[in-house]
Image (cartoon, rainbow, N blue to C red):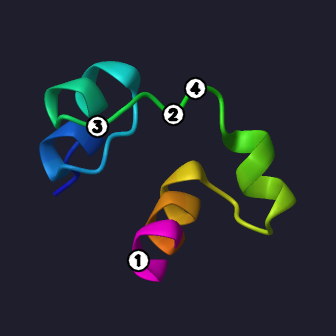
């Protein structure tokens, strides 16, 4: 079954991030691709693993 990103807790839109107490990411696809990622989700996960 398909579940939307907000339902899975992986949405990175400004509304969902604010609800999670996180800051907005803005338009990050260009930064994600610059670092070799295909999606902002993968890029943010890689940053979280560094901490």
C-alpha separation, residue under disc 1 versus residue under disc 3: 15 Å
C-alpha separation, residue under disc 2 versus residue under disc 1: 17 Å
What residue sits right under mark 4 in the picture? 26
Picture coordinates of residue 8 (x, y %)? 17, 52
C-alpha separation, residue under disc 3 versus residue under disc 2: 9 Å
At horizontal 29% and vertical 33% (from top left) the residue drawn is 17
Per the rendered image, the range of residues in magenta is 47-51
Cβ atoms at labels 1 and 3 below 8 Å apart: no
Q: Quadrant of the N terminus?
A: bottom left
Cβ atoms at labels 3 and 4 below 8 Å apart: no
Cβ atoms at labels 3 and 2 below 8 Å apart: no
Q: Foreground mark, 2 or 1?
A: 1
Secondary structure predominantly adopted by residues drawn in magenta: helix
What residue sits right under mark 1 in the picture? 51
Q: Quadrant of the C terminus?
A: bottom left
What residue sits right under mark 2 in the picture? 25
What residue sits right under mark 3 in the picture? 22
Cβ atoms at labels 4 and 2 below 8 Å apart: yes
Give the structural element (helix, strand or loop) at label 1.
loop
Is residue 49 shown in magenta? yes
């Amino acid at each position: 079954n398909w579940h939307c990103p907000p339902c899975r807790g992986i949405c990175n839109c400004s509304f969902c991030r604010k609800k999670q107490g996180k800051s907005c990411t803005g338009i990050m696809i260009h930064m994600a691709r610059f670092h070799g990622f295909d999606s902002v989700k993968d890029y943010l996960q890689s940053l979280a693993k560094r901490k």
